[in-house]
Image (cartoon, grey):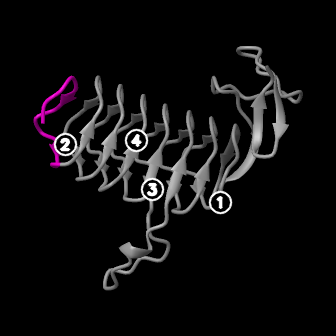
Amino acid sequence: MSGDFFIHPSSFVDEGVTVGTGTKIWHFSHILAGSVIGAECNIGQNVVIGPDVTIGRGCKIQNNVSIYKGVTLEDEVFCGPSMVFTNVFNPRAAISRMAEAKPTLVRRGASLGANCTIVCGVTIGRFAFIGAGSVVTKDLPDHALAYGNPARIRDWVCACGARLDAGLICAACAVAYEREDYGLKAVT
């Protein structure tokens, strides 16, 4: 495999993987066949991706993250250290259930905190922020700040990552938001 990207010599990238321009794959990682990684991504140490995972442009995947079959990350998703996705709802060692893998979607700009777990079959909305150590068991809307076990919506965050005030205005960048069917949207 050759291209305008970096793969550390200690990592394994299987045949049939697409890696975008400017992407960096660091030490001891394994990217399995059929996976697609967008441009300008940073894949940390000891990361496992795939098979057949799709990762958008500009994603940051920190050390010790596992992203299993059925997961799609849109652009600019942040995966904190040691967080994990599941792909089968009721796994058993002696029973193969990969045909039952449930798709998981993480929308553009979402941040997934260190050590959180994303249970298969959920959608995490655009620019949502999941707290460290949380367990996400249900869909979360755009701009939700959610944490706990199970994760619950506790507040709302701006696309810049700052918590919104009671009037849904960001003190950090002054963007105003309004409620919509699926979370919040910036007022234009």
First of labels 4, 2 by sequence position: 2
Residue shown at 33% from the left, 46% from the top = 64
Give the Cα separation between the discs numbered 1 and 2: 32 Å
Q: Which residue is mark 4?
A: 55
Q: Is residue 160 above or below residue 71?
A: above
Q: Which residue is mark 3?
A: 85
Give the Cα separation between the discs numbered 1 and 4: 21 Å
Task: Classify 10 Å Cα crowding around label 3: few (below 14), some (14-19), many (20 and above).
Answer: some
Task: Classify 10 Å Cα crowding around label 4: few (below 14), some (14-19), many (20 and above).
Answer: many
Prevailing secondary structure class for the magenta stretch in the rendered image:
loop
Q: Range of the magenta residues?
A: 1-15
Q: Is residue 158 above or below residue 27?
A: above
- Please give the label number shown on residue 86: none
First of labels 1, 4 by sequence position: 4
12 in the magenta segment: yes
Residue at disc 4, secondary structure? strand
**What amino acid does circle 1 point to?**
Lys
Tell whether label 3 touches label 1 (CB within 8 Å).
no
